[in-house]
Image (cartoon, helix red, strand yellow):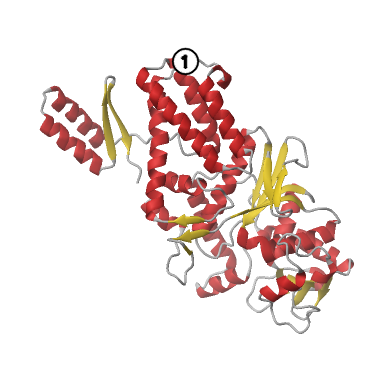
């Protein structure tokens, strides 16, 4: 398996810190507002990567945090006349609900920054002792010039980074690029006993260092997040963490591409900003998941109605093939051996070859659709139940990564069941006018009927 490492700027053969295990840390949201499409893109992309490691039999420890204390949260809580904790307690369940609807598996650990203040204080105290951090009247700062490799993640020199960055004006800072590890208490703000006997709260960058190292160790495998976090957030994480431990921080850095709406960057100022909640009111959550995962994680995604319609059609093709095979399959209880069938073996090898090349999902899906085309052809010729079960097992294997194909259909309401029975009676009486009328009535309620030799089958229309 090769993965693109932002740190080296090239694809590298994946070699975990511990054989057979993967430690992943994904920078989660700052919970001052509901999740938006950018959050969903990152969460889905790394959910697929996590699941592919599991598909490859790695033991994965997946950590994704909630930043529940920072300037934005303090400002929003004040606007809403509530505490910062009340704001976090309101919004974290909203993220969990929206992510759950998108089929995103819960993290093994979902730490909150406020739960790790002792660890944060300990790291800052260590940096003060090393002489690489210093106190001012308004907080404690990390001296960027003390870390010679600053800029190695974003591949820029320090002077280039400083020129392109917005830095706080603070005459007490030794250098304008130095960043806050700890912010001194201000009236009305949450505060904890901190380093150098200074009450206050953590800076943003130090939170992720403390949470990731406490759970995954001082050196772990993968640190992930959006491309916008490369600098300064991840660059600062590396500087403070590696200075504190004297060891490499994360071996591999993975960053996902942005969301664009109708070829423009998504932003509130342009009026093209969508929350996950808003999108899920208009589209089936699995259509949205499929849409988000079907573009390679490092590439930007254009969000548009046309592209979502294409995603809907693609997902429908996958599900229709799965359902058609499912009708024929009878589980014998045998363990699937895909090498028994040349078509399945070819599809499996192509899927894995693509995913092993930096999770090239577009090529992986192309292999899946080639497989679907071949299976649809075989279905016309007829396949036996054993072959059908083998195909079904393969679909389920790849769906352990994709999580969009197999769905547990909700039971039909009594009214719908009654309409289907009435239509069957109308067809038996050759009352095709009434039969067609009921079919259209059901379609308006999101149900499609298919008449087969085994009876009338139904499925829900993807919205």
Q: Position of residue 245 (x, y in %)?
A: 84, 56
Mark 1 secondary-structure assignment? helix
Within 10 Å of the Cα at label 1, are there few (<14), some (14-19), or many (20+) other Cα atoms? some
Task: Look at 46% across and 48% down and name the residue there.
Answer: 291
Which residue is at the far right? 130
Query: Does residue 235 sit above or below 196 in this rendering?
Result: above
At x 41%, y 24%, the residue is 325
Q: In the image shown, does 230 or 37 lie closer to the viewer?
A: 230
Residue 429 against residue 208 in the figure, above or below: above
Q: Residue at x 44, y 70 (%)?
A: 270
Q: Is residue 81 visible?
A: yes
The image quarter in which residue 324 lies:
top left
Picture layout, residue 296 above or below residue 436: below
In the picture, residue 364 is in which quadrant?
top right
Question: If the image is split into quadrants, where does the N terminus sit?
Answer: top right
Picture coordinates of residue 18 (x, y %)? 78, 39
- In front: 442, or 109? 442
Q: Is residue 316 left or right of residue 457?
A: right
Q: Is 453 displayed left or right of 341 in the figure?
A: left
Taking 90 as reference, is 159 left or right?
right
Q: Is residue 106 visible?
A: no
Q: Nearer the viewer, residue 170 or 186?
A: 170
**Count of numbered circles in the view:** 1
Extreme bottom residue here? 171
Residue 86 locus on image (x, y percent): 55, 64
In this figure, which residue is indicated by the disc labeled 1? 386
Above or below residue 458? Residue 300 is below
Instruction: Where is residue 73? Give x, y as percent.
Output: 58, 68
């Amino acid at each position: 398996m090769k993965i693109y490492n932002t740190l080296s700027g090239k694809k590298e053969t994946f070699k975990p810190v511990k054989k057979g295990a993967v430690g992943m840390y994904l920078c989660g949201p700052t919970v001052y507002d509901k999740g938006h499409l950018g959050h969903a893109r990152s969460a889905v992309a790394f959910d697929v990567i996590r699941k592919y490691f599991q598909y490859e039999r790695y033991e994965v420890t997946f950590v994704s945090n909630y930043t529940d204390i920072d300037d934005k949260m303090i400002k929003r809580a004040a606007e809403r006349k509530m505490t910062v904790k009340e704001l976090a307690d309101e919004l974290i369940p909203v993220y969990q609900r929206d992510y759950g609807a998108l089929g995103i598996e819960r993290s093994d650990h979902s730490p909150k920054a406020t739960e790790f203040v002792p660890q944060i204080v300990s790291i800052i105290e260590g940096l003060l002792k090393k002489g690489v951090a210093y106190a001012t009247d308004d907080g404690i700062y990390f001296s960027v010039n003390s870390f010679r490799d600053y800029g190695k993640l974003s591949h820029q020199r320090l002077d280039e980074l400083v020129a392109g960055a917005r830095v706080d004006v603070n005459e007490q800072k030794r250098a304008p690029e130095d960043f806050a590890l700890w912010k001194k208490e201000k009236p009305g703000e949450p505060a904890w006993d901190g380093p150098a006997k200074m009450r206050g709260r953590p800076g943003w960058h130090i939170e992720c260092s403390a949470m990731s190292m406490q759970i995954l160790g001082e050196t772990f495998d993968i640190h992930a997040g959006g491309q916008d976090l490369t600098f300064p957030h991840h660059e600062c994480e590396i500087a403070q963490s590696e200075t504190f431990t004297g060891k490499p921080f994360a071996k591999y850095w993975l960053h996902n591409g942005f969301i664009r709406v109708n070829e423009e960057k998504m932003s509130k100022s342009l009026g093209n900003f969508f929350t996950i909640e808003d999108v899920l009111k208009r589209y089936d959550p699995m259509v949205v998941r499929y849409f988000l995962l079907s573009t390679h994680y490092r590439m930007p995604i254009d969000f548009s109605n046309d592209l979502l319609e294409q995603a809907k059609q693609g997902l429908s093709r996958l599900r229709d093939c799965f359902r058609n095979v499912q009708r024929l399959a009878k589980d014998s209880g045998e363990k699937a051996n895909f090498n028994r069938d040349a078509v399945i073996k070819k599809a499996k090898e192509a899927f894995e070859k693509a995913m092993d090349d930096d999770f090239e999902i577009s090529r992986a899906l192309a292999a899946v659709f080639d497989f679907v085309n071949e299976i649809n052809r075989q279905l016309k010729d007829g396949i036996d139940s054993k072959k059908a079960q083998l195909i079904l097992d393969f679909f389920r294997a790849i769906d352990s990564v994709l999580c969009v194909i197999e769905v547990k259909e909700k039971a039909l309401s009594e009214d719908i069941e009654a309409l289907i029975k009435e239509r069957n009676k109308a067809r038996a009486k050759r009352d095709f006018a009434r039969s067609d009328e009921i079919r259209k009535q059901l379609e308006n309620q999101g149900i499609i009927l298919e008449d087969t030799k085994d009876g009338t089958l139904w499925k829900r229309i993807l919205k």
